[in-house]
Amino acid sequence: YFCVLEALQNALKHAEGLRRVVIELDGSTPDELRFAVRDDGAGIAPADGIRDRAGITNMRDRLASFGGELDIVSARGVGTTVRGRVQTGSDATMIEPG
């Protein structure tokens, strides 16, 4: 929930020319939940890179604590997609940092 909320807030705050945001949730497998937040804003040119500021770092850390991952893809003129996945069910255990 918090990662989807953070990705949505980032899109609303940073995506120039934003007209639409699509949120997808996929719980079709019993052991994993996936999400994607896509916007149609200006996107980020590959040369500019995506910097892990506090919000992105928090999303990565949150998902990693449950064995999950975060992926961000962006292209100038296309928009940005934030994808995440986290384990669910009996195999989902919190991983203690350090």
Image (cartoon, helix red, strand yellow):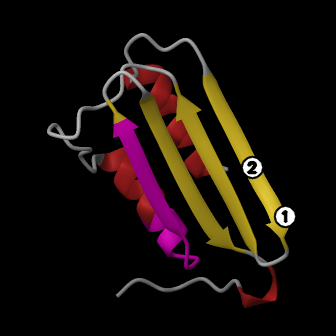
Is 3 one of the magenta-colored residues? no
Name which quarter of the figure residue 80 lies in.
top left
Q: Secondary structure at mark 1?
A: strand
Which residue is identified by label 1?
28
Residue 85, above or below 38: below
User: Is residue 67 found inside the magenta-colored segment of the image?
Assistant: yes
Q: Residue at x 40, y 22 (%)?
A: 15
Q: Position of residue 29 (x, y in %)?
A: 82, 71
Label 1 crowd bin: few (<14), some (14–19), many (20+), radius 10 Å: few
**Depicted 31 relative to depicted 3: above or below:** below
Nearer-the-camera pick, 66 or 70:
70
Segment colored magenta? 61-74
Picture quadrant where residue 57 is located: bottom left
Which residue is tagged 2?
A: 25
Residue type, label 1 = Ser
Percent position (x, y) of residue 90?
80, 88
Q: Secondary structure at mark 2?
A: strand
Q: Give the CA separation, mark 2 to mark 1.
A: 9 Å
Q: Who is closer to the viewer here, 61 or 33? A: 33
State whether residue 46 is above or below residue 63: above
